[in-house]
């Protein structure tokens, strides 16, 4: 199975569940309208609404996945600290009560990556940090040079992740059980996209977390170096 086939089969499966449910409840309502009481009618329509929303989110994420195909990565020399500054206002708009703090390594050398893709990675991580943590809590974004790699950390004070769930985190369509997943929108594609993008740009992503004690996502990218940059430009 190619990656495309695998993707199509997962997507079809994910679409079938809400569609089957929408069709089933619509048919029941149409066929037995007079025999169903108002309370149940409302319940069935609510399910149809929820399942439609699930489909809409799914389609949005699929569009993102298909736009992200590996071949259009353009590696450039990027100043990570100023790149993070650019994203922050956008994320703040979505999580108005959170307190976002940037702790930059002021002597950070440039990295070699695709800046648009880096924005998408950071947006996914910071958005999750906001979604899976209480209103008004702190999200710390820090950068640091470690040996010859650049580390970027996103730390939240949220619900955290159980050790046994670590292996599911980066899987396609996987959402974990916590009291905030049911309240927040999502379809489990964000971290899947994030990991693919990080690895396609020669980076690594790791997570440290404890249930109810927050999470830290750590991504590492190689420092910019002229020779690598030339190799990358020849490849594309
Ligand atoms: N910072 C975090 N704290 C706790 N749980 C998280 C965090 N980020 C992601 N998760 C868990 O991992 C799941 C997958 O994340 P993601 O792929 O971004 O999907 P979603 O669309 O649900 O946000 C989420 O549903 C959530 O359960
Ligand atoms: Mg997400």
Image (spheres, rainbow, N blue to C red):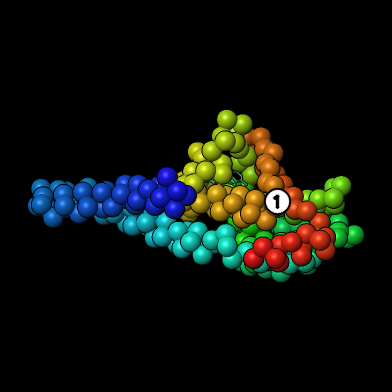
Residue 103: x and y, percent?
A: 82, 56
State whether residue 104 appears in this view: no
Residue 142: x and y, percent?
A: 78, 53
State whether residue 48 appears in this view: yes
Whether residue 131 is situated above or below residue 168 in the rendered picture: below
Q: Residue at x 67, y 38 (%)?
A: 209
User: Any atom of ligand 1 within 8 Å of the CB at mark 1?
Assistant: no
Q: Residue at x 63, y 54 (%)?
A: 200
Number of callouts: 1
Position of the N terminus, as image quadrant, is top left
Residue 175: x and y, percent?
A: 49, 44
Q: Horizontally, is 94 left or right of 103 in the view?
A: left
Residue pushed farthest front?
Answer: 234
Q: Residue at x 57, y 49 (%)?
A: 191
Q: Which residue is mark 1?
A: 203
Q: Residue at x 64, y 44 (%)?
A: 158
In depth, the one of 55 and 29 nearer the eye is 55
Whether residue 16 is situated above or below residue 234 in the rendered picture: above
In depth, the one of 25 and 175 nearer the eye is 175
Disc 1 residue crowd, few under 14, some 14–19, many 20+, Cα 10 Å: some
Q: Secondary structure at mark 1?
A: loop
């Amino acid at each position: 199975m190619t990656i495309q086939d695998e993707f199509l089969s997962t997507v079809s499966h994910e679409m079938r569940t809400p569609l089957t449910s929408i069709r089933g409840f619509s048919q029941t309502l149409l066929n037995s309208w007079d025999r169903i009481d108002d309370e149940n009618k409302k319940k069935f329509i609510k399910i149809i609404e929820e399942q439609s929303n699930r489909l809409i989110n799914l389609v949005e994420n699929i569009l993102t996945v298909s736009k992200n195909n590996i071949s259009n990565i353009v590696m450039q020399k990027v100043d990570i600290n100023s790149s993070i500054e650019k994203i922050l206002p956008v994320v703040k708009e979505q999580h108005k009560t959170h307190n976002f703090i940037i702790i930059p390594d002021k002597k950070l050398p440039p990295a070699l990556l695709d800046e648009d893709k880096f924005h998408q990675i950071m947006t996914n991580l910071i958005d999750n940090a906001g979604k899976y943590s209480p209103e008004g809590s702190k999200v710390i974004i820090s950068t640091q040079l470690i040996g010859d790699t650049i580390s970027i950390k996103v730390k939240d004070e949220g619900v955290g992740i159980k050790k046994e769930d670590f292996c599911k985190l980066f899987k396609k369509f996987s959402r974990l059980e916590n009291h905030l997943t049911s309240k927040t929108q999502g379809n489990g594609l964000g971290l899947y996209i994030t990991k693919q993008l990080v690895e396609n740009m020669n980076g690594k992503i790791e997570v440290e977390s404890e249930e109810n004690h927050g999470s830290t996502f750590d991504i590492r990218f190689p420092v910019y170096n002229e020779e690598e940059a030339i190799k990358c430009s020849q490849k594309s």
